[in-house]
Image: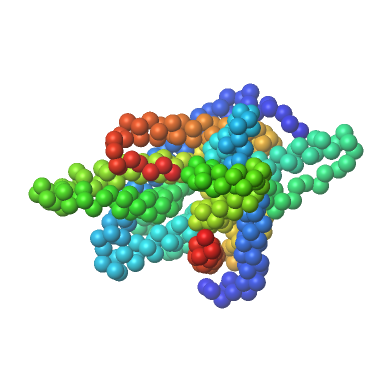
Amino acid sequence: MLNFAILETSYFWWSVLNGLGVTLALTAISMVLGFVIGGVLASMHIYGSPAVRFAAKAYIFVFRGVPLLILLFLVYYGLPRVTWLRGSLFWDLVLTSPIRTAVFVLTINNAAYLGEMIRGGLRMVPAGLLEAAAAVGMTRTRAFFRIHAPLALRSVLGNLGSETIAVVKASAITSVITVRDLMGGPTVLGKVYLDPLTPLLVVGIIYIVLVQVIDVGTKLVRGHLALPGSMQAHHV
Amino acid sequence: MIEIVAPYMSFWLKGAALTLGLSAASFPICILIGLTVAFAAVSRARLVSLAAATYINIFRGLPEIIVIFVVFYGSNIVLTTVGKPLGFQFGGTHPALAALVALSVQFGSYAAVIFKDWMAVFPKGYTEAGLAIGMTRLQIRRRIVVPLLLRSATPALGNLFLVMLKISALASLIGVAELSRTTSVIAGSTREPLVCYVIAAAMYLAISAVSGFVQHRFEAATKRSL
């Protein structure tokens, strides 16, 4: 029953390499786009009117509460049934390929988590520092970009690392809508070789290494950017 | 559109009940594993703490979907291979059992991290007080450390439960008839995937909201008793 014939084929290792690229791309794109949308959500929450704030809260509640698997199925199988979407930019941009659907779903899901994280970071900056910025005559925009945002970013750096790890792991779920990522590509080959287990074990090890690399990277960046004194980043 | 899926409602609710049941069954096991691994991680025996750290790092890095598949296929293959020479026929792992094991083992590592973080800030005075009145180390752990640890970690554990509810959707991929699985079946037979998945999403939100509410009440109660 157990044989490792699949490991001797070059197809397998190419699919692993390809899949690794897809996983890294999925993670990077949905982190960047998610951060932008998350930033918008956080500022809606902090500066918005009650209605705007409610909208941000509702978004975060919905996309943090629904499993990624259901979201993927909803967008991949459900949305193409909406006839008036046909021919729209959204249709051409997202619904025409599994991988772009995956990017879209990972992004809107990730944005909810990042939005909460950014809001927490912005609130963690002591009011005195912002008052000091106003006292030396900075405009609100300048104070935001020079004082508020950099300090908030530093304080959430650790969370940003764990969120990246969460996205790497979550991106494996996109294999269910036929995305050939690190999980999807090799396991499809595993089905061809009637050996479902070996590919899983191989890519499992790669995921573990990948997560350790992200961990070490986050620690290095945090150490590099750490400020002496009171604004020590919270360990999470 | 709703009329088409309405007859399936009882089937759906059964799925929702299984989703809740699966998480409710594996959560106590995951807490037990978490406590054990956390105590092992702070153990003075190098080998024990190394084993605990390895366990935590492995499951921190593995996607849940892989763990579920490995437990399901792996247990099948191992038990079939072991069973053949011993002369018994193995009929295949029950998917729900595989999902239960996979979720417990994986989330046990997450719980261990939560407990370990709390142990790092556990006030030394409590254990010293226990020693002063002549308690053994085991008694201190059982009567002082564990109850306080569980209480202070309640918010984090509540969040962990909500994460588990969502991750348990992956059990549908190995054939456990929980909420996601029943939704896929209904979507297939009614050819209304959009309506079905929207309803499933609403059901998950409802389950999360109710669990969140219970957690909130529970937290308030533990705070009062502290």
Q: Quadrant of residue B185?
A: bottom right
- x, y percent for residue B21: 65, 61
- x, y percent for residue B136: 66, 43
Image point 35% across, 32% down: which residue?
A: A223
- x, y percent for residue A14: 53, 28
User: Camera-side residue: A205 or A218?
Assistant: A218
Image point 80% across, 35% down: which residue?
A: B81
Residue A71 in sight: yes
User: Camera-side residue: A142 or A170?
Assistant: A142
Residue B188 in sight: no
Image point 53% across, 66% down: which residue?
A: B221
Q: Quadrant of residue A91?
A: bottom left
Marks counted in the figure total: 0
Instruction: Tell which residue pokes out farthest to the right in this image.
Output: B87
Image point 15% across, 48% down: which residue?
A: A133
User: Camera-side residue: B220 or A107?
Assistant: B220
Position of residue B170 in the picture relative to residue A84 (left or right): right
Instruction: Tell which residue pokes out farthest to the front in this image.
Output: B133
User: Camera-side residue: A148 or A47?
Assistant: A148
Instruction: Tell which residue pokes out farthest to the left in this image.
Output: A137
Position of residue A91 in the picture relative to residue A192 (left or right): left
What colouring does the structure picture have? rainbow
Position of residue A157 in the picture relative to residue B24 (left or right): left
Seen in the picture, residue A19 relative to B213 is either above or below; the reply is: above
- x, y percent for residue A81: 47, 62
